[in-house]
Amino acid sequence: MASASRVRVGTLVPLAKDNAGSSNGSVSAIPIFEGSNVVGRNHLVITDKRISRKHLSLHASADGSIEVVVEGPNPIIVRSEGQRRKVSAQETAKITHNDVLELIPGDYFVKYMDMADDPIGSNGLKKGKRHSEEDSAAVKRNRQIMEDEALARTLQKMKPANWILHKPPLPISFGTHHSKAMLLVYPQGIRVVVHTANMIHVDWNNKSQGLWMQDFPCKDAKDINKKVPFENDLVDYLSALKWPEFRANLPVVGDVNINASFFRRFDYSSAMVRLIGSVPGYHAGPSIKKWGHMKLRSVLEECTFEKQFCKSPLIYQFSSLGSLDEKWMSEFTYSLSAGKSDDGSPLGIGKPMIVWPTVEDVRCSIEGYAAGSCIPSPQKNVEKDFLRKYWTRWKADHVGRCRAMPHIKTFTRYDGQNIAWFLLTSSNLSKAAWGALQKNNTQLMIRSYELGVLFLPQTLKSIPQFSCTEKNRPSQDGLTLGKTIKTKLVTLCWKGDEETEPSTKTVRLPVPYQLPPQPYGPEDVPWSWDRRYTKKDVYGSVWPRHG
């Protein structure tokens, strides 16, 4: 049925937490149409990962009554006729005119109002019984600005006194701040954490995720102007966020201004990774190599790898797939194939493989079909013919995580159980995250903020391992201080002899999937979250409850 011909039966109207008569500014008004409707994260003014992208399914009847199904992992509250009822994942409830939903218990209140008493239908903005489900882009943009301003005012009143809230600039539509990171300042140094989990229980408890962290000491006075690539990349990224400078009183340090330059106080010379970030904008000139896949390309071009990695395969593993085409896939693969072998020849183009859960993987996961809400790729993106040759299975028997669906995002080049390089990142496989070249490859357009860490083979000197929370540990694996060592990246399944090369430090990376990955079989179907699946999952549920 075309969206413009669907019959509107009512609206979910946002309410204040303690005042049923006023909007709380945190949820958009949601029109409800006869038949199937979805309520989810895109209806919030700002992202809250407790609300799934497909949080509720609503099946509306012509008489205005609605059956609600909780599709996400978190429960809701239904308030009807003075009663307050908790409705958990995959459970159903009926609602009628004037009933209130708490999309998260205690948060995000909406009241259902049928067409007879619909404020949106009666305020002149939308008249008549039939309405389009989608506004024009301009109207949406203006509405978003007004909602952002309303939410900002609300949050400023509600936030704890020692919190500072900041929304980074998003100059290009459909962008987001997708990075996940922490900068933890201690009296003697800083801990930098880059991870893939959102700050919600289900992400840390039920998913396969990745986290990297390293502690760095304060600089000595003589090294205050010394800069290394990790530091420059971190400060460039923080500068792009344009957060407002503020003052803080830190133990030992005293009163300081916290801005991007503050983070130059720390000595990152021992960094074991490179930062690979994305910042929204149209990047040209020298900036074209600062962000996205062009940043990754430029770093790899500076590296020398063992000859065994010439034309070796590439792995793309992520939890959301953008709308891609073969031209962009070639562009992206070219960047990830950069680098030269130890004889000076280019590594050559690697064959990409995509590690992606099948429908059966999701159905049998520890969350059942509900896990699919965090693998939010639609059928139109997933089932493009040219992608078929890339699909490989999510298999994680070696780390016991086959049934913990991946929210982790990783990209790597490998040969057997040897790793040329490995990237842990917030970036999914999309143009929005990695950027797309434009204007005859002279400009890179990126929509979103992303952040990742790139593991590379290194030649370095053995030094004590600095810790912000413990006394400094000995050098890595007891190696003699000051000794020059080379690092070699391998998987947990590597079975080589670490003693054969005493000057080589073997770094075992917890690659979450088995290498080489297994190609899809004839019965395997890649997961897409907007298809209907009637075979029941481990909890006896189908997906979705209403198609």
Image (cartoon, helix red, strand yellow):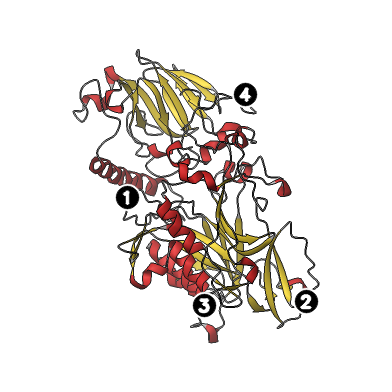
> Is residue 364 shown left or right of residue 501?
left
Q: Mark 3 vs mark 2: which is more N-terminal?
A: 3
The amino acid type of the residue labelled 3 equals: Val
How much space separates mark 1 and mark 2, taking CA atoms? 53 Å
* Residue hosting label 2: 502
How much space separates mark 4 and mark 1, taking CA atoms? 40 Å
* Residue hosting label 4: 540
| The N terminus sits in image quarter | top left
Identify the element where label 2 is drawn.
Answer: loop
The amino acid type of the residue labelled 1 equals: Ser
Identify the element where label 1 is drawn.
Answer: loop
Identify the element where label 4 is drawn.
Answer: loop
The amino acid type of the residue labelled 2 equals: Pro
How much space separates mark 2 and mark 4, taking CA atoms? 55 Å
**Is residue 276 placed above or below 50 in the rendered structure?**
below
Q: Residue at x 40, y 32 (%)?
A: 18
* Residue hosting label 1: 173
Estimate how packed mark 4 is, as few (under 14), some (14 to 19) or many (20 or more) residues with alpha carbons within 10 Å: few
